[in-house]
Every structure is written in C-alpha cells, then in structure tokens.
Image (cartoon, rainbow, N blue to C red):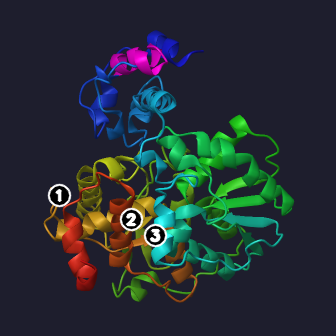
Amino acid sequence: MDLIQVYTDKCTLCGLCVDVCPSYDTVDVIPSLCDYIESGGKAEEDKPLEYDIRLCYTCNVCTVTCPEDLGIRKLISASREKRTGIHGATEEQGLVDPFSDNNLYTKIGEWEEPVAFQNEGKKSKVVYFPGCAASCMNKVVGKSTVKALEAAGVDYSVMSGIDYCCGSVSAGAGNTKPLEKLGQRNIDEINARGSDILITTCPGCYRAFKLLYPQRFENLNFEVLQSSEYFARLLKEGKLNFKRDMGEYFGIGEKLNIFYQDPCHLTRAAGIYEEPRRVLSAIPGAKLVNPTPENSVCCGFGGGVRTSFPKKSVSQAAGVHKYAKSLGSDIIITNCGGCMKNIIEGGYTAKKGLNESECDSLPVYDLAEFISLACGAEPTERDDLKLIYLSNKALQECLTHYDYAPFDELAADYDPDLK
C-alpha cells in the first residue's frame, strides 16, 4: 500500500508522536509532509516545505509511540529522498558519501592515519565490518571490538573501513545512491571470504546489512549480527572470560553503576535492547541503573541534525549526562560510535557552560571497550578532546556554512597551536 494511503487510512492526528518528539511540536507536520510527498516531482513543481525536514533525528521515538506504528519519521525519510531526487545531494548529504569531494572521513584521514586492522582480507567464518566511523573517527570502537574478539578466541577477519562503506548514513539523510552502488559489492566480498557471520558495531552498518540490503540485493548467504548480539552469544557459549571486577578497576569499591545508552538506530529501528544489557549484567562489579529501555533518550547525533544544527544536537547530548546522573550513574556506556562522540562532546560543552544543559559530565565508554577491559585487556588508547576537535575541524572544512561557537575554545583546550 502507498505510504500516503496508509497515513490517510490509519493516522488519526492524535498527537502522541509530537508529544514525545524532540524536534516538532505540532501534529500539523504530518498532513504538511503528506501534501509535499504527493506534490509534483519536477524541480519547477517542487513546493516549499512548511517544516524543516533537517530537524528530525530519525530516532523513531514517534514510531514506537504511535498506536499504528506510523509517527513522523517515515514521512521525513520519504520527503528527504524526494527532495534529494529533485535537487540533488546537499553538502551535508555528501559528508559520508565515499564518492563525494567533501567526505568527512577522507578529510580526517588527511590529518591522521585511519586504522589498519590486522586480518584485513583473509578468509574466515566470522568477518567484522567496522565501517567508516570506527576506522577514521571514533577509532576506539573498532580497536576495542577486535580486542574483545581476540579475548574470546574468535577466528575473524576485518573488512577495511577505508575500502568498504555501507552507504546507510547517506541513505538516512535522503541520498540513497551510495547504498545502491556499494551494497552488492559488500555482499560479494563477504561471500568470497566464505563467511557465515558478519559482525557490525555501527548501528547504521547493521541497519544496512540487516534491513536495507535484503530489500534491494540478493545472495546474503551469511548471518548479520550487531556486536552486542555476538557478544551475548559468546557469553552464552562460555567464551567471554571476565577477569576484572570493574567496580575495583574504576576505584568505586562497590558496584560500578552503569547507564547504558540505547542508540536509537539500534533499538527503536532494529529492536536490539536486551543483548547488551545481558552482557553488562554478567560483568563482575557492574550494575545497570537502567535494566530496561524505558525512558531511553536520544543522544542528538542522528538524522543529520549534528551537522545542520550542532548546538541543538550537542545540547541534546548533554541531557544524556543529566539524565544518567539523576539515576545515580558512575559511567555511561554506548553501543554506537556516533552516540559516544556526541555524548562526550555534550559533556565537554556542558562542563564549560557552552550549551543550554549545564551539568557535570560522566565518563563515556564504548560497549566493546568496556567488555575488553573486563576480559583483562589493556585499555584502548583514546583522546576524547582530539576526537571532538578533529571531527569539528573536518566539518568546518567540508561544510561551507558550518559555524559552531564552542570550536574555538575546544581548539585552545586541545592545542593552542591549532587554534
């Protein structure tokens, strides 16, 4: 059934979606977007949008709240794809397009070498797809995932995050061309390695292989697992051997209170809530303050909002610290490189009084990073200020209109010579 017909038949404009939406406050956005999607498909016929479709985090809070599984996000995605088809990709939509001249990860790679993983290219039953972000930007995610796999004795290979991109993030912003160009190539490479299991860390990569590729391509002769699903399987098989009490490791003395941040694109979009909690609950000296996903909050990173509205996005991320502290947390653990970076930046700017959510910040760790530590591995090298400095510097160079005030103070904190 046609998308607009579904909304015509089922949407009652009850307003539950906008009650929970962090960006839109009127249900009028729904008929407005429906009218836009149904309007002419040529440039000269394209009508102005009444509501800014760049504001949507694509967090799916509206969808899971809607009694008819509708919400606003589906209309946003359709509107973005239509507008891109008529007017072409914007600068923002080119940021994670490997065919674009203003690719964010290519720019960061000019300043700092991307991760060259061991076992790239070899044949194995288990293959890890780190994606662009874990190879070029938030490298602690990719490096820690490999450490955790090695601690569990897994025979694995890695697909280079330089040579292989899933195309999902561009698709979420309305530019589906990278996904269409790259999908079958990715599938063919995994099949050529004789792999039975594909592991991803990035929720966007997971969504591509698990949900988008099967709709468009053939020959997915392998199982697709997000890293938390695979870690939960290793735990069940007795292959995750935890050697550290994490309360003692962090100097808490008793249980380390963990706030697990549910990534929107992994949870509400793909339904993965339980597996990461199962693993974290099994780690000695660790206690979840949110054992269920009830009242989970969006970090503000997704849907292109971070690049188009950085202040809004980072303020939303600061709210994660505030909420986690209200639950008595000692630490925030994420399962998404984008969430991790944004929450780190939200804590930094909040501590500096540079956004609307002033609060003390908490340490932020990746799930695989925490698991590898619990298994006895050495800490993965990381530099949080460098991470947010380089990502903002790259955005300034890749986007004509990127203007983010805290960047100057960050440059001074990171390295006065780089100001």
Residue 200 in the image: x percent, y percent? 63, 60
Amino acid type, residue under disc 2 in the picture = Ala
Which label sits on residue 383?
none
Vertical relation: 215 (above or below) 208: above
C-beta proximity under 8 Å, tags 1 and 3 = no
Q: Measure how far apart labels 1 and 3 are at the Cα level.
A: 29 Å
Q: Position of residue 142 (x, y in %)?
A: 57, 72
Name the element at disc 2.
helix
Whether residues under marks 2 and 3 lie with C-beta atoms below 8 angstroms apart, the answer is: yes
Read off the residue under disc 1.
357
Q: What residue is drawn where x is 46% and y is 60%? A: 104
Identity of the residue drawn at 41% across and 48% down = 92
Question: In the rendered view, would you say 255 is above or below 2?
Answer: below
Q: How crowded is the residue under tag 2: few (<14 C-alpha within 10 Å), some, or many (20+)?
A: many
In the image, taking residue 396 as reference, residue 60 lies left or right, namely right
Membership of 43 in magenta stretch: yes
Residue 130 at x, y percent in the picture: 61, 65
**Quick check: can you spot residue 282?**
no
* Residue at image coords 69%, 80%: 118
Mark 2 highlights which residue?
394
Highlighted range, magenta: 30-45
Tell me the distance, in whole angstroms, between the alpha carbons under discs 2 and 3: 6 Å
Which of the two labelled residues, at mark 1 and mark 2, occupies the earlier sequence position? 1
Is label 3 in a helix, a strand or a loop? helix
Identify the image quadrant of the C terminus.
bottom left
Q: Is residue 165 magenta?
A: no
Label 1 packing within 10 angstroms: few (<14), some (14-19), many (20+) = many
As shown in the figure, which amino acid type bears the numbered disc 3?
Answer: Ile
Identify residue for label 3. 108
Can you say whether 243 is above or below 156 in the image?
below
